[in-house]
Amino acid sequence: EPNLAPNTKHLEAVRTICEKHFADHPGNLESVWFATTRAGALEWLEKFFEERFANFGPYEDAIATHSTFVFHSVLTPYLNTGLLTPDVVIQKAIAFANKRKLNISSVEGFVRQIIGWREFVRGIYQNFSEKQDTTNFFKHKRKLKPCWYDGTTGVEPLDLVIQKASEFGYAHHIERLMVVGNLMLLCEVDPHEAHAWFMEMFIDSSDWVMGPNVYGMGIFSDGGVFATKPYICGSNYYRKMGGFKAGDWCDAVDGLYWGFIEKHKDFFSTNPRLSMMVSTVERMDEEKKTRIYAAAKKLKAQITEA
């Protein structure tokens, strides 16, 4: 778990500015954990190598209710502000992995995110940012209600991520994609509304990062510039990946999921990777469908507005 950052005069000065000018913005000034110097960023990197690197691969997609960062490196705040550079991170990572003979899943997974995924995202932004910013593939228009900022949506996995983001300014990639992005897409949230939320809630936010990840991966509003399919799921994914217990929110999330597939069945039917979901919803018991669709309609009205 993260320790609080040392209370320096610079940190106190920034706190004063935030309290004066940005008091109504999301976040928590008491939970500042991240380093603000090059030396502090390097120390964080070494701590990741020693404490979490070995288990990064096996658990990188886990949603943990009992851990803030799980085994993630949480280097994006430092990389995106220039306190660390990709070449330094990779060189140190490979050297440490060779010395400790770490498993390939952790090493490959980590390296690929830095020099594979990160550079790919940058390339997408450089070549397609205007198209992504102006495309609304599903023509979604709904707005977020305040519960998306205080974590009171009633959907347990979503509230967990919102509260974590509010306190620490961070959530890992699966929490952002499969929890927040998924539910924004299923609730038909306007792409610019979704993009603004991600920019506001995370300390590693930057337009070149959030544009491709939100428009392309999170809500598929670019229609396939970035990814070959929307990444969506029902409640079973959260129960499997995060150990959440069944609750009323499950029917609502499942209703959003299957309702979205049924509404866009022409789109899903043309994709070989997705067409079986159309067959599944068409065979679904009508009583169950009525129940979960009613729950979905209620949830959508509670957490978003037209």
Image: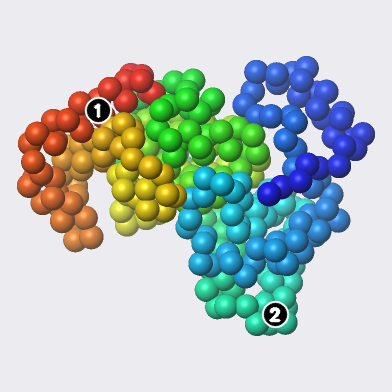
Residue 261 appears left or right of 25: left
Viewer-nearest residue: 116 or 260: 260
Residue 245 appears left or right of 6: left
Residue 178 appears left or right of 109: left
The residue that disc 2 covers is: 100
The residue that disc 1 covers is: 295
Q: Position of residue 282 (x, y in %)?
A: 8, 45
Which residue: 23% across, 60% down? 273
Regarding residue 250, the answer to whether it shows in the image is yes
Total numbered badges shown on the rendered structure: 2
Q: Position of residue 205 (x, y in %)?
A: 61, 42
Q: Residue furthest front?
A: 245
Which residue: 84% across, 49% down? 37
Residue type for callout 2: Arg
Is 171 drawn above or below residue 24 in the view shown? below
At label 1, counting other C-alpha atoms closer than 10 Å, the crowd grade (few under 14, some 14-19, many 20 or more) is: many
Which residue: 58% across, 67% down? 55
At label 2, counting other C-alpha atoms closer than 10 Å, the crowd grade (few under 14, some 14-19, many 20 or more) is: few
Element assignment for label 2: helix
Whole-number angstrom distance, CA of label 2 to CA of label 1: 51 Å
Give the position of the C terminus as an image quadrant: top left
Q: Residue furthest right?
A: 9
Q: Position of residue 36 (x, y in %)?
A: 81, 45
